[in-house]
């Protein structure tokens, strides 16, 4: 906005484009900004007979229950650690799968493979939770009744044992998400100039060297953008994954509770809007700080790719 | 959050509640035909009610003329009822009458219901007369928040099991009233039908848990309005944390033993299915729930189920019957209602008007049911009980059974319904009947306790985990969450309540 003249003529020039932004902005305003007014509910004891605005202020009391037990640290740990693991594995495996797909000579097979790996993404998590249940059910599950006995192992009470769940959730997450990641990377791999590879072939580069020295550097902007987007939502978790897949089993809370499931449970529990808002606000504030930090780090390392 | 969001009495769903009515004088309220007030009624849906419009019109025809009020009933699925009410309130939508099933304590606590003492004095004289001292069924800080359902209010924990199997294996149903007898019977059935699940959990995933009473030591237990962990036992006014009691431990051990013996559905702690539903397709021998008991409850009762697919069933009482503070069925008035007076007039009429009461419970007169010359009611031809087009919970949750006509399918005694209500007077009544816990002072602690309960209770009560290691952990976490403060606060309020009662 320094050069008033320019920006004005620019905005005229782009006026149609700005007009096209209006519906999107309105959507953002109504869905993301208007509800922010409700933030103050987090500081009130909601009395329905008095109404939202006349309910008494209670300061930080609604936040107290978050910290009443040691749960909150477990929950934060779960949210963040799962996200870190997911981001790393999803990126590495996504690139790996994309490279394999790009190298497939048989185009028909490549298309089939693309469709196959992206299919799980289209499944509702409710259905996924029952696919997982079909494996892990104690009564009829494939694991306890077929696979484990075949290996000579004792059946496991899957929904009562915390141990395997970090692995189960990671597998389910990757199964669901690797497809779309791979497709995005594939798109940028396909865009790489073929001549680079031909030159490398002439120089006698191995397949591995081609990946390390050509493919990865060429798709770096894509990797950074996707990484930044993921880090931005580090404090949010896939609700369905953590709530539905473990069937909300209490015994697993230590490894499955995340901020989203906790907020949901708190609201459903006692219809306590105040406490639920407090938890939601807490999540937003920490998420906000995290985005800022991630962006700061990125702008240090690679200023071109930072968000702002 | 499975367990707290729904009520104690949601679990009574399976209960057969057919009600009937007695001839009592109709009181005619004042007429105001020119100004018709329209009120809404938020109700949980229990069955299918495709004939809603017809029944509403039949009701309105009565009330329009007598009190100048019309009602519009809105049904919400029972499973999401309390959330729906919560959402409506959060959206500041106006409501009038609100059916109460279990969450009275929370509704009153959140200011969703209004205190109705003054309205009762002004427009609810008939309600007061019918209810007597049962009226004060939800009093918080000395104020009354709801009009109770007046019917047989005695409940008992029963073991419901397949009559055909019991007869086939020559088991004496009366012997199953003790734990030892029950276990002996389970063993026999398990040997004869090894594929069959012996006992399954209810809709909350609970097999024995809060139903359970360690009968040798505890004759009755009162969960102080459905809190699950605040209990008083045997009318001892000391509030205790149920999860710390010996009785609870004993039950858990018992269920764990059942689990190991293969009596219990293995996935019960996880599955979303209501275990007891497999009863209907023959894969289940028994389940436990609360039953509303008719007459003398010490005998096993045989009844046919709600529909043809149900098996003839013995309902065997495994605890003493009691009228307790956990009985939360009733109706309240929303605090944002603009028609509170009309609501109370409408309720008052419902408590005395035979036709209105029967219509609300059983459908439109001369379409769903008809009145015989002897003053009994019967279903019209072609109307099938259980699939009548007006299958609601009204007949067992709202109003006054004593004001409904007696159906011939239930009894030939025109006083049958009145006798049901009279039986309440002789029943064991918990000293805490009517106590409604104001949990505001300990809200934080309760929310924390609730998450701990959520974490442990279901797994423990399903029998699938080791009681000796997990129960102490459970109790320790509850302590850390501040259960002792909650118990203390409940004790203080209960003492106050009891002192006022005297």
Image (tube, helix red, strand yellow):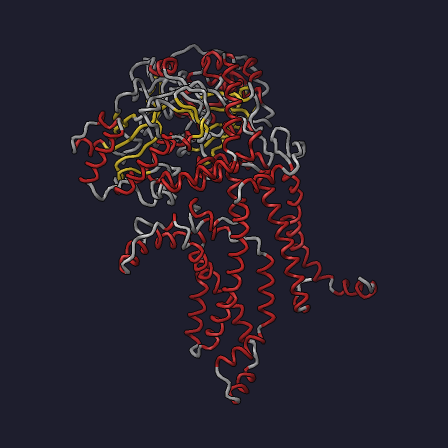
Residue at far bottom of view: A202
Q: Nearer the viewer, residue A210 or B181?
A: B181
As displayed, is residue A92 above or below residue B35? below
Toward which corner of the image does residue B154 lie, by quadrant?
top left
Q: Position of residue A198 (x, y in %)?
A: 53, 86
Q: Position of residue A144 (x, y in %)?
A: 31, 54
Say which residue appears at 60% left-offset and 28% top-offset. B336
Query: Left or right: where does residue B191 sit relative to residue B351?
Result: left
Query: Left or right: where does residue B360 sit relative to residue B406?
Result: right
Toward which corner of the image does residue B20 lie, by quadrant?
top left
Say which residue appears at 31% left-offset and 31% top-offset. B306
As displayed, is residue B241 above or below residue B138? below
Toward which corner of the image does residue B466 lie, by quadrant?
top left
Query: Left or right: where does residue A141 sit relative to residue A171?
Result: left
As displayed, is residue B151 above or below residue B7? above
Q: Position of residue B172 (x, y in %)?
A: 19, 27
Q: Nearer the viewer, residue B267 or B60?
A: B267
Is residue B145 among what the camera can see?
no
Is residue B382 among what the camera can see?
yes
Q: How many marks?
A: 0
Say which residue appears at 47% left-offset and 33% top-offset. B75
Q: Position of residue B354 (x, y in %)?
A: 42, 16
């Amino acid at each position: 906005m320094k050069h008033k003249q320019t920006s004005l003529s620019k905005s005229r020039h782009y006026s149609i484009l700005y007009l096209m932004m209006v519906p999107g902005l309105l959507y953002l305003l109504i869905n993301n900004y208007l509800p922010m007014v409700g933030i103050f509910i987090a500081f009130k004891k909601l009395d329905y007979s008095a109404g939202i605005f006349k309910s008494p202020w209670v300061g930080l009391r609604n936040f107290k229950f978050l910290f009443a037990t040691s749960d909150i640290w477990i929950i934060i740990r779960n949210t963040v650690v799962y996200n870190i693991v997911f981001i790393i594995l999803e990126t590495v495996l996504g690139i790996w799968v994309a490279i394999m797909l790009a190298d497939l000579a048989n185009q028909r097979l490549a298309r089939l493979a693309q469709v196959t790996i992206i299919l799980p993404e289209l499944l509702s998590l409710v259905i996924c939770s029952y696919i997982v249940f079909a494996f892990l059910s104690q009564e009829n599950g494939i694991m306890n009744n077929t696979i484990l006995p075949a290996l000579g192992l004792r059946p496991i009470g899957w929904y009562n044992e915390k141990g395997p769940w970090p692995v189960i959730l990671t597998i389910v997450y990757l199964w669901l998400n690797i497809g779309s990641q791979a497709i995005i990377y594939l798109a940028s791999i396909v865009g790489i100039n073929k001549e680079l590879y031909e030159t490398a072939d002439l120089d006698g580069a191995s397949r591995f060297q081609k990946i390390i020295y050509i493919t990865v550097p060429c798709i770096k902007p894509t990797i950074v953008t996707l990484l930044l987007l993921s880090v931005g939502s580090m404090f949010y978790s896939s609700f369905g994954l953590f709530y539905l897949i473990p069937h909300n089993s209490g015994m697993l809370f230590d490894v499955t509770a995340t901020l989203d499931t906790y907020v949901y449970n708190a609201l459903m529990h006692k219809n306590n809007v105040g406490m639920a808002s407090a938890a939601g606000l807490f999540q937003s504030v920490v998420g906000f700080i995290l985005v800022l930090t991630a962006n700061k780090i990125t702008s240090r390392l690679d200023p071109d790719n930072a968000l702002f | 959050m499975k367990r707290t969001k729904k009520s104690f009495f949601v679990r009574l769903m399976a209960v057969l509640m057919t009600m009937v009515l007695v001839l009592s004088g109709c009181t005619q309220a004042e007429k105001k035909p020119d100004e018709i007030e329209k009120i809404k009624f938020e109700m949980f849906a229990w069955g299918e009610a495709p004939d809603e419009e017809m029944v509403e019109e039949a009701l309105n025809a009565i009330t329009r003329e007598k009190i100048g009020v019309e009602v519009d009933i809105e049904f919400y699925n029972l499973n999401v009822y309390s959330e729906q009410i919560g959402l409506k309130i959060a959206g500041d939508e106006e409501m009038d009458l609100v059916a109460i099933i279990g969450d009275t304590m929370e509704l009153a606590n959140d200011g969703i219901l209004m205190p109705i003492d003054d309205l009762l004095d002004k427009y609810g004289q008939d309600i007061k007369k019918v209810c007597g001292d049962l009226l004060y069924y939800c009093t918080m800080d000395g104020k009354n928040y709801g009009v109770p359902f007046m019917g047989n209010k005695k409940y008992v924990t029963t073991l419901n099991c397949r009559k055909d199997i019991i007869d086939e294996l020559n088991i004496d149903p009366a012997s199953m009233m003790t734990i030892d007898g029950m276990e002996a019977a389970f063993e026999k059935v398990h040997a004869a039908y090894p594929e069959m699940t012996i006992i399954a959990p209810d809709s909350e995933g609970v097999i024995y848990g809060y139903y359970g009473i360690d009968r040798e030591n505890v004759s009755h237990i009162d969960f102080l309005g459905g809190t699950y962990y605040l209990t008083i036992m045997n009318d001892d006014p000391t509030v205790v944390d149920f999860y710390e009691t010996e009785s609870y431990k004993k039950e858990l051990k018992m269920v764990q033993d059942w689990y190991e013996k293969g009596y219990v559905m293995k996935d019960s702690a996880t599955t979303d299915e209501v275990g007891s539903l497999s009863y209907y397709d023959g894969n289940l021998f028994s389940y436990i729930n609360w039953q509303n008991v008719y007459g003398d409850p010490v005998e096993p009762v045989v009844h046919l189920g709600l529909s043809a697919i149900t098996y003839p069933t013995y309902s065997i009482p495994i605890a003493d019957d009691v009228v307790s503070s956990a009985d939360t069925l009733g109706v309240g008035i929303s605090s944002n209602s603009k028609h509170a007076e009309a609501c109370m007039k409408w309720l008052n009429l419902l408590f005395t008007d035979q036709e209105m009461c029967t219509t609300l419970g059983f459908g439109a007169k001369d379409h769903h049911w008809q009145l015989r010359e002897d003053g009994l009611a019967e279903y019209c031809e072609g109307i099938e009980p259980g699939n009548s087009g007006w299958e609601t919970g009204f007949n067992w949750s709202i109003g006054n059974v004593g004001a409904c006509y007696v159906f011939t399918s239930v009894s030939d005694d025109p006083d049958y319904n009145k006798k049901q209500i009279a039986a309440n007077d002789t029943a064991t009544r918990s000293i805490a009947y009517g106590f409604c816990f104001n949990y505001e002072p300990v809200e934080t602690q309760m929310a924390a306790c609730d998450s701990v309960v959520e974490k442990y209770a279901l797994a423990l009560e399903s029998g699938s985990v080791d009681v000796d290691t997990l129960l102490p952990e459970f109790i320790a976490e509850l302590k850390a969450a501040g259960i002792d403060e909650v118990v203390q606060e409940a004790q203080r309020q209960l003492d106050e309540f009891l002192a006022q009662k005297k």
